Amino acid sequence: MPDSNRLEREIEEILGKIEQFPDARTRRRRSTNRALQQFGTAVSDRLRGFVRQISRFSISQVMLLSFILILGSLFFRRAAPAPMTWVLYAGIILFVSSFAISMFGGGRGGSNGPPKWRGRTVQYQSSAPLSDRLRRWWNSRTRR
């Protein structure tokens, strides 16, 4: 008997929620939002993959590529003057940006925390001032 009362209450709750079913405009808005979220997720995933592929190149390799673009555009300027002008501009922009990144940070390097050797953190003892070292030396001499 208690199970049937509970079942009836659950059925009534479900029927009550059906009356509160969202109208067509709300359902359309929800489906539009869901589609936009899926599109944004897809674009984000592709950009993340593209950045992951680009991050495999070092700044020095990008700088070398810019030199090759500049020299190539100068050598092949007579064959195709209009495209080689744009290649020259691209090489100059790439060189300036890679040089700026290498000079002002953003590249790999620098310390990422305390120094480690064989998986253990290395702690350097700071040397005591000269006066303390002399005092210790003098005290060790006078105790003998």
Image (spheres, helix red, strand yellow):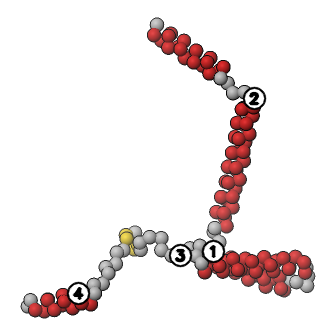
Earlier in the chain: of badge 3 and badge 4, it is: 3
Query: Distance from label 3 to label 4 (Cα)?
Result: 36 Å
Using the image, tell me which numbered label, if any, was put on residue 132.
4
Q: Nearer the viewer, residue 143 or 13?
A: 13
Q: Nearer the viewer, residue 31 or 79?
A: 31
Identified at 83% across, 85% down, the residue is 74
- Picture quarter containing residue 105? bottom right
Residue labelled with disc 1: 58
Dot in front, 4 or 1: 4
Identified by mark 1, the residue type is Ser
Identified at 70% across, 56% down, the residue is 46
Q: Residue furthest left?
A: 144
Q: How many marks?
A: 4
Compared to 107, does 140 lie above or below? below
Compared to 100, does 138 lie above or below? below
Residue labelled with disc 3: 109
Element type at marker 1?
Answer: loop
Earlier in the chain: of badge 4 and badge 2, it is: 2
Q: Position of residue 34 (x, y in %)?
A: 69, 40
Left or right: residue 114 compared with residue 133: right
Identified by mark 2, the residue type is Ala
Is the C-beta separation of discs 4 and 1 under 8 Å? no
